[in-house]
Image (cartoon, rainbow, N blue to C red):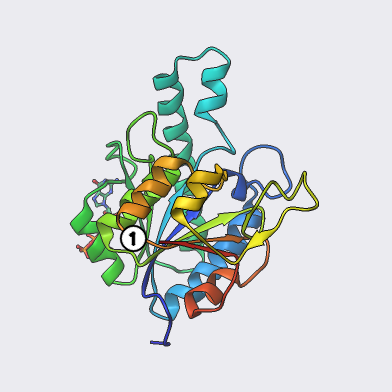
Amino acid sequence: MTRTKYKRVILKLSGEALMGDKSYGIDPHVIHLIAGELKEIASSGVQIAVVIGGGNIFRGIDASAKGIERTSADYMGMLATVLNALAIQNALERLGVATRVQTAIEMKELAEPYIRRKAVRHLEKGRIVIFAGGTGNPFFTTDTAAALRAMEIGAQVILKATKVDGVYSSDPMKDSAAKKFSEIKYIDVLKRGLHVMDSTAISLCMDNNLPIVVFSLKKKGNIKKIIEGKKIGTLIRG
Ligand code: GTP
């Protein structure tokens, strides 16, 4: 096994990360690339669990703004994450990587239900575990699911993949004076209202001292570099 900074990680992928340049759905080429990176990391002995969003298919919050009742909209969003999880599982297994999907809402015919001890055993056996269905509860985001699952399985870090390469003082897409942080404290993310993860997820990580690395998925090899201990993106810590 290669020496790495982290041995067990949670990778949080937004649904949008799977869209590539499309405006909706899943780009098979993009998931193939992600799967390739994960295969390489897993083969070095690092245990990887993936929490996947669903915004490329259905966004609960947007739908609720358009008149669908919030709880229903959130459940619809959870189902979208299951579609993405199956797509990632398929891409990984095509590359010969052993995986298990576990869902927060039971749907036994298509995946295992979430069982913490089973998830940990899968990781120990070198399987990539994909957590689908968020926390299984409306009003919670998949970022919060990532924080919760990370705590439960004893992950050492959350790798939060985004479109930008870290946390900025303001939106770098809109403000050319936006400054990137190499490190920032949880409390400052909350105080400044930086929209990197929702406040529930940040608070959960803060209370349990779980570091988060925010980075861009667009640059190939970033996940591996972070796991090896290189300073990529922004580290959020206490
Ligand atoms: P160990 O034998 O404990 O290492 O794990 P395993 O996952 O290989 O064993 P198990 O016999 O539990 O699972 C065999 C296969 O069935 C795996 O592909 C699992 O993902 C799948 N599986 C297990 N439980 C369920 C379930 O509740 N629903 C579905 N759809 N598949 C399941």
* Total number of numbered discs in the rendering: 1
Residue occupying the point 39% across, 21% down: 71
Q: Nearer the viewer, residue 180 or 158?
A: 180
Residue 101 can be seen, yes or no: no
Q: Is residue 202 left or right of residue 110?
A: right
Residue 175, image x, y percentages: 77, 47
Residue extending farthest top: 67
Q: Nearer the viewer, residue 230 or 136?
A: 230
Residue occupying the point 56% across, 76% down: 225
Residue 191, image x, y percentages: 50, 45
Q: Is residue 158 left or right of residue 221?
A: left
Q: Which residue is mark 1?
A: 209
Label 1, secondary structure: give it.
loop
Q: Report the quarter where the C terminus lies.
A: bottom left
Residue occupying the point 30% across, 66% down: 123
Q: In the image, is the residue at mark 1 within 8 Å of ligand 1 by its beta carbon?
A: no
Residue type (three-letter) at the residue carrying disc 1? Asn
Residue 150, image x, y percentages: 33, 57
Q: Report the quarter where the N terminus lies.
A: bottom left
Q: Is residue 201 left or right of residue 84?
A: left
Residue extending farthest left: 117
Quadrant containing ligand 1: bottom left
Residue occupying the point 65% across, 69% down: 220
The residue carrying pointer 1 sits among few (fewer than 14), some (14 to 19) or many (20 or more) residues within 10 Å by Cα, namely some
Residue extending farthest bottom: 2
Residue 109, image x, y percentages: 30, 39
Residue 146 can be seen, yes or no: yes
Q: Quadrant of residue 167?
A: bottom right
